[in-house]
Image (spheres, rainbow, N blue to C red):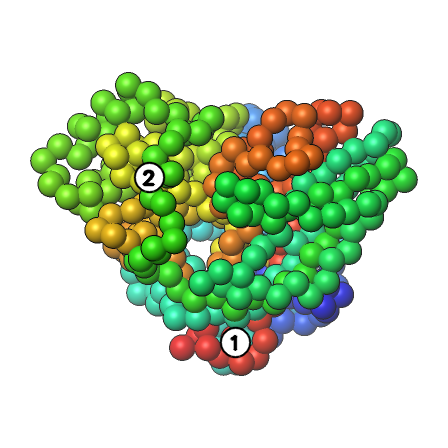
Amino acid sequence: MSRRLAALVAAALATACVPASARRIHPPQVPNERIAEAIQSHIDAESQAGGGYFHVPYQGKTLDLKLVRVHTEYLADLGDGTQFACVDLVGLDGPVYDVDFFLKGLPGPATVTETTVHKIDGKPLYAWEQAKNGTWRRVKVENAPDRLLGVIRGEDEFEFTYKASIPPLTSPARLWLPLAQSDAYQTVQVLSVHAPGSRRELREQKHGNEVLFVDLVPEDGGSTIEVDYHVRRREKSPYPDPGERPADDLAPETLVPSTDAMREIAQHVVEGKPTDLMRARAIFDHVIEQVRYAKYGSGWGRGDAVYACDKKSGNCTDFHAYFIALARSVGIPARFAIGASIPSERNDGGIDGYHCWAEFFADGKWWPVDVSEADKNVRLATYYFGHHPANRIELSRGRDLVVDPGPQSGPINFLAYPVLEVDGQPVKVKTEFSFHRGALQARRSGD
């Protein structure tokens, strides 16, 4: 499966953003590495000429921007001599802009033919829709169906590949990686596991997570770990779960603390709200109003409730840490889960990293919420208060995970990307997610 997916990735990624004039996708001719190099060089050259800033015209003004990252998962050769790139740039005015580029001339000297602001702080300004003849057109967000905005209702089915690239090693190392499991909302079949070293499965007791533990030696440096899944998942709405103990989800965690300041904020937010459901909605709305979706700078991405409260920005982990901390502060049990959001507008390709979400307990039920996705698209805010779409895979749940053997650094904050320790020190692991829907599943997701 993984070889077939790899062959399709570059072409499939084109569906993320493609000009209306694009024809059917052809086999890629220009490697993604060359596209990344070309767009990086373009931004560097323009920034040097622009006094250190990359200038983008937008709504009658010029944005002064600096490069944050190139979205390598969306780089694509569209065929007919056209390539696509997508990057994040941060503005002097504060927001993070997701900018789409179309290029020609590669693999020789590249010319950028179109530059368009696609998202601001994660909020899309337009979506892309594919016609039956294979061409693509922009669709205004307000006119776009849910499937173009990240939501598949009912059921979804797909193959999911988790790939981790081990860096060069100079001494023995240990690695912990999540293993997805079946539950009432997802049925998971492990198709294959390829890993170097000596491996075994561990059970994390508090939340019931399964963890792949790998002992590595220097000779394993540069190799990859790959886990391939077949997943069928149902859309989640409020549900009773008599086997759970909601009170267990009132306890604080390292980065989701119970503090006087958090209680004061929460009590102010829920003032005048007589039920837990109304209080939870008030907290949900407060987080959306107060926190900006921005993966920029330092401190974000740790699921740090205090960071989100103080800095008023962060990614999905920070949004949901803040929501959970506030909910617990007024006696509402809440809990965390993490995995990946599977693109709804296309049927193959790369995935832009992990995604996380939360649940809270009220009226005898667990209520699914996704605050950061609601923040990106206000039209779907009501949906995301009480639903998780079907196009997801859950890899693990909970915070401060304890396994034996565990990392020398202590409990695992949350587990989506691998935790690698070399000589007891954490080392970053390049991690890539990709997916593929079969023809039948693709038709179902388009219904």
Q: Which three-letter amino acid code belongs to the residue tagged 2?
A: Ala
252 left or right, relative to 339: left
> Looking at the picture, how far across and down is residue 79, in whole percent?
66, 67
Of 52 and 139, nearer the camera is 139
> Looking at the picture, how far across and down is residue 285, in whole percent?
24, 41
Q: Are marks 1 and 2 in contact (CB under 8 Å)?
A: no
Residue at far top of view = 260
Q: Residues within 10 Å of mark 1 (few under 14, many from 20)?
A: some
> Looking at the picture, how far across and down is residue 424, in whole percent?
73, 25
Residue at far right of view = 219
Determine the image quadrant of residue 105.
bottom right
Quarter holding the C terminus is bottom left
Of 374 and 173, nearer the camera is 173
Numbered disc 1: secondary structure: helix
Which residue is rendered at x = 34% and y = 35% of the image? 250
Which residue is rendered at x = 55% and y = 42% of the image? 205
Determine the image quadrant of residue 78.
bottom right
Vertical side of 258 occupied by 120: above or below: below
- Residue at label 2? 247
> Looking at the picture, how far across and down is residue 115, in whole percent?
51, 50
Determine the image quadrant of residue 192.
bottom right
Q: Which three-letter amino acid code belongs to the residue tagged 1?
A: Gln
Sequence-first disc among 1 and 2 = 2
Quarter holding the N terminus is bottom right
Q: Residues within 10 Å of mark 2 (few under 14, many from 20)?
A: few
Which residue is rendered at x = 78% and y = 25% of the image? 423
- Residue at label 1? 441
Of 399 and 156, nearer the camera is 399
